[in-house]
Amino acid sequence: MNAEQKPAPSQWQPGVTPDEVMHRHGMIGKPVSRLDGPLKVAGKARFAAEVPYEHLAHAALVHSSIARGRISELKTEAARAAPGVILVLTYQNMPRLQNPPLFGSAPKAVGASTLPVMQNEHITWNGQPVALVLAETHEQAEYAASLIEVRYDVLPAKTDFDAAKRQARAPDTILGEPPAIEIGDAEANLQAAAFKVDATYRTPRYNHNAIELHAATVAWQGDELTVHDATQMLNGTAWTIAQLFGIDEKNVRVLSPYVGGGFGGKALWDHQILAIAAARLAQRPVRIVLSRASVFRIVGGRTTTEQRVALGATQDGQLTALIHTGVAAMTPYNACPEQFSFPARHLYATQALKVAQQVADMDMMVNTFMRAPGESIGTFALESAIDELAGQMQLCPIELRRRIEPSKDPVSGLPFSSRHLLEAYQRGAERFGWDQRNPVPRSRRDGEWLIGMGVATATYPYYRMPGAAARIKLTNDGHLTVSIAAHEMGMGTATAQSQHVAERFGLPLEQVTFELGDTTLAAGSLAGGSSQTASIAAAVIAAGEQLIDQLLMLATGDSPLAGFKRDQVEAINGGLAVRGDTTRAETYAAILQRAGRTALQCEAPAPEPAELQHYSMHSFGAQFCEVKVSAITGEVRVTRFLGSFDTGRILNPKTAASQFRGGIVMGIGLALTEATEFDPRSGRIMNPSLAEYHVPVHLDVPEIDVMWTDIADPHSPIGARGIGEIGITGVGAAIANAVYNATGKRIRDLPITLDKLL
Ligand code: MOS
């Protein structure tokens, strides 16, 4: 046991004794297979588009073909007369709704934009829904939608990033952080530095392509609304819909037990709102399943950026200046400025720091969170520049990072809660065979293939969202059920939390049920910001303490536990035992049975995330990549990849490995194959399909090795820091750095397509 693995006072729950489950291994740390896996393999997991209703009506959308202007004429007669059509919804007959409350504007607000949803004739982006057709079948709805003719008065639109960025503005805030920070005089230090890099990096638009298409099945019963949705924000969706439709939040039930991939995109968009309105008008339950093209048109993605990174260093490799500034495309209606400067605020020691982010308003679909928004493309720029600096200094890029490792947070001055980046580098380098790398570019070749290696830092913040609670029910057969409106998007939420609950209460996995995906359960928190595991674990801990207090109140009379308090007992072998004397024990079943109780239930909220005020909390990693680049065609193939992570404690190595690998696969797409082709003449997305928008497929992805330090963070619940997003960070730079090592060409413009290498 090293120092970090010893229990330390917990700052996330001030004043409470250390949580010993944080350090107990048994159920936690086991590679348990996903509990929902058999249901999915057998086709028994029911997704939002599969919920059956009688008299179900099917919806299809018509999208605007201009970026800005107004509808001058809507011809809907042919659609209304088409077979099976029930209703054609346009701004003319759409119920009057409030504008969506924007994400972040209230605790449960999740509106992706503040734009009204089909309330008037105005067009604000190319792809905006202008009509919804409701029909007896999906095919009839799609066909009738194709018959609708729309004419527009077209207005000039800002659809060119290079033009828009000339009028860039500073946003008020970037996810609660200041958009700009200056410590010392970074520009002056840069000028005076012995070594300097000053470069511009560009990243394109990227679109969400979860395999499950966005879908909802909605039904009204009087004033009560049920929404079966594919969402990663259940409670926020219910609240926001209630505001929009002017109904009581309690009358909105949102269910989402399974989601086929989220990545930030499974949120509240226009399609659910339109389907709910159509269901009300038609007095029928309604299903909407977006086509892949519709997902591109009405679900936001990662936005365009142009970033400057400048580094100044002394002869011995200390940073004197770190500058990371730039512009991201955005709209005035949303709140996602793409926090690309966040990594530079916390990663490296520097005498002077300057970060500044601006946004450039465009007439386009609002952008949104997409797996490590900001950090994925911010690390591309920053970690490419670090590599450029190391090359100039003729220093190993890992050694350079060792020299600029900070002892405390460079901006806040707070201590890191737990940071083992150098250990991740060292262990990764050994396993990957980093010593095989020739630092001289273009020095390894195998026939037509130039071979290179690159490395980059991965980082993602620790977040814990307020608002989560847990409901626990213990029955007199000793079975324990925990219920939270949490989300299962394929990452293994129920599995990891069942392991946590089993460990915490001393139960075998079969005696534990973890219920999620329904707003009638205790409030969850959104599955975003890699925060869900810690957020709901904190609630389970709080409710669990109540449960043990209640059990001890029942354990009176001849119970061996009579008179003992919570901190004098531990949960073990399906019951409670006196600490230090496990012969004085009683099972949960025996406690309930003696008390004549069939069940015991309690519910408690998680405490506020106070740990974030005391510590700088981040996850780290080292991404190692080997590529081969064809000297003839410029084609890049990733041949080997290793991610070495420091993300706190790993609850389940099997599901964790999948999260890391999935992030790296998405990073290969970000680096090499994906880009949304946006026509600046029309503001239209030109490649809205998986045939033309290239997500990496099996042949693009090598064996991906992953490893982790597994050092518990003493200041997060159960020591875990979240793993959903860090896997994609650093990948773009690791690949670009490997391409440079292979070819001697520094590509600062993603994706690295072959034309840029010829
Ligand atoms: Mo993540 S982009 O917060 O789902």
Image: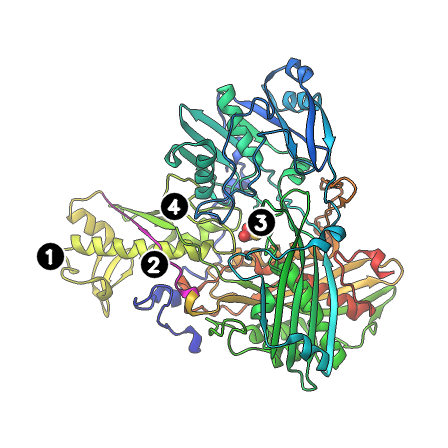
Mark 1 or mark 4: which comes first in sequence? 4
Residue extent of the magenta highlight: 599-612
Q: Are marks 3 and 4 in contact (CB under 8 Å)?
A: no
Cα gap from disc 1 to disc 3, whole angstroms: 53 Å
The amino acid pointed to by label 4 is: Ala
Q: Is mark 2 within 8 Å of ligand 1?
A: no
Q: Is residue 449 left or right of residue 689?
A: right
Q: Is residue 122 magenta?
A: no
Question: Earlier along the polypeptide chain: callout 2 or callout 4?
Answer: 2
Write down the residue under mark 1.
558
Q: Which residue is mark 2?
A: 504
Crowd tier of the residue under label 1, counting other residues whose Cα lies within 10 Å: few below 14, some 14–19, many 20 or above: few
Instruction: Please state which of residues 689 and 370 is positioned toward the viewer in this rendering.
Output: 370
Question: Please, what is the three-letter code of the amino acid marked with disc 2?
Answer: Arg
Please state which of the two labelled residues, at mark 1 or mark 3, is closer to the viewer.
3
Q: Which mark is residue 263?
A: 3
The kind of residue tagged 1 is Asp
Residue 523: numbered disc: 4
Question: Residues under labels 1 and 4: Cα distance?
Answer: 38 Å
**Earlier residue among tags 2 and 3:** 3
State the residue at coordinates (72%, 40%).
688
From this viewpoint, is residue 314 visible?
Answer: yes
Does any atom of ligand 1 lie closer than 8 Å to the CB of label 3? yes
User: In terms of secondary structure, where does tag 1 sit?
Assistant: loop
- The x and y percentages for residue 69 are 70, 34
> At 59% across and 71% down in the image, what residue appears?
182
Q: Residue at x 34, y 65 (%)?
A: 19
- Residues 336 and 417: in front is 336
Residue type beneath disc 3: Phe
**Image coordinates for residue 386, horizontal then vertical, percent:** 69, 72
Q: Residues within 10 Å of mark 2 (few under 14, many from 20)?
A: many
